[in-house]
Amino acid sequence: MLTTFELTGVTDMWTVIGKESQVEDGQGHAFLILSRAESTMILQTGKEINELDQSGFFTEGPTIFCGNLGSNKYIIQVMANMVRLLDGSVQLQNLPLDLGSPIVHVSAADPYLVAVTENGQMILLSLDKSSSRMMQKPEISVVKANLKSKSKLVTACAYEDASGLFTTETPEEIEATKEATESIVTNNADIDDEDELLYGESAPSLFEKAATETKSSDADGDKSLSRSWKRFLTTPNPTYWTLVLRENGNLEILSLPDFTVKYLIQSFNLAPNILQDALFSAHLASPKEPENLPKINEITMVGLGDQRRRPLLLARYYTDKDFLLFVAFHLI
C-alpha cells in the first residue's frame, strides 16, 4: 500500500542510517530530515513514519546538511552556525561556529566534510577517531582553509577516491618503489648471514646467484608488460580530495586534509573537452571569456562501479538546463 502526504515549505531533505532502524542488521535508514525556512522536522522511519518530538537533532532552524560519518556509525547535522554529532538520536557534541558568515553548502567524504560559507570561506570538519579508540566520545574537529587564490569560492565537493587515479605518482613509480624496498630487505637479510660475512659466498651459491640474475633479467620485460594490467588486481588505498570552483571559472583539486592544490583547470565554465592541468602555467594570461557566459553553480564527483573505480565529474549551470560530464582515465 502506497501512502502519500503533502509536505509544504520543505527546501531540502536527507535520509540517515541509525541504530534505531528497524532493519535486522540495524544499518537501515532510521531518520528522514526535512529542512524548512524556519525549522527542521525529524521523522523516524519504519513500518510507519512518525515525527520525532524529543531528540538530539536541532529543529529550531533550517539544516544545511545531514549525513553519516564513521562508517555510518554516527550522524552529523550542519546548520548555518552550528554542528551537531549524534549517535542515533542521542546528541554527542554541539559545536557552535563563529566564522563571520553563515555556512551555505556542505559536501561529505567520510570522515571529512567540506563546508563553504556565504562569503566564500572554506572549513574542514573531520571526525576524530582517536577519541573513540580511547573509549571517549568521538568529536568533530574544525580547520579553516588558508587558500591563496583571491577569486571568491563558489562551491566545493569532497571526494574519496578508490580508483587510484587521483595520485601524484604513476603506477610504474609506485611499483618501482615497492621493488626497491623489497631489494633492500633482501640485501639486509644476506648481510645478516654471519658465515657469509666471515668466509664469503660458497661456489654453489655464486652459481645460484648468477642463475637468479639471468632469470631476473629475462623477466624484466615481462614485468613491464604485466604492470599495465596487474594494477587492476590490487585495491588502491583511498585518498581524499576536494574540488573547488571559483568565480573566475577556475576549478582546483586539493588534497585533504592539508588543502594543497594538486591540479588546476582554467576556464572550467567554458566546457573544455579535456581538463588539462595548468598548475605550473597559471601565471600566464587566461583567455578572455565571452560576456554573459552561463556560470556553473554546482559540481559533484562520484565513483561508479562496484568498487567505485570509475570517477565521474558532473557540473550544473545556473540555467538548470545544461550540465557537463567528465570521466577520469589513466594516461598511457
Image (spheres, grey):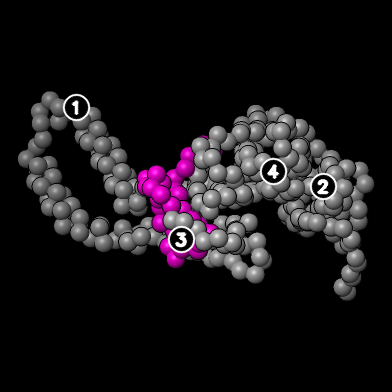
Which residue is label 4 attached to?
Answer: 118
* Mark 2 and mark 1: Cα distance apart in space: 72 Å
**Is 163 left, or right, of 246 in this rendering?**
left
How far across and how far down the image is residue 158, in percent? Answer: 59, 49
| Circle 3 SS class | loop
Residue topped by disc 3: 328
How far apart in space, not on screen, are marks 4 and 2 (Cα)?
15 Å
Secondary structure under the numbered disc 1 in the rendered image: helix
Q: Nearer the viewer, residue 23 or 268?
A: 268
The answer to whether residue 262 is magenta is yes
Separation (CA) of disc 3 from disc 1: 52 Å
Q: Is residue 133 left or right of residue 277?
A: right
Nearer to us of marks 2 and 1 is: 2
User: Is label 3 or label 2 in front?
Assistant: 2
Q: Amino acid at mark 2?
A: Pro
Query: SS for tag 2?
Result: loop
Q: In this rendered view, identify the residue nearer to me: 231 or 56.
A: 56
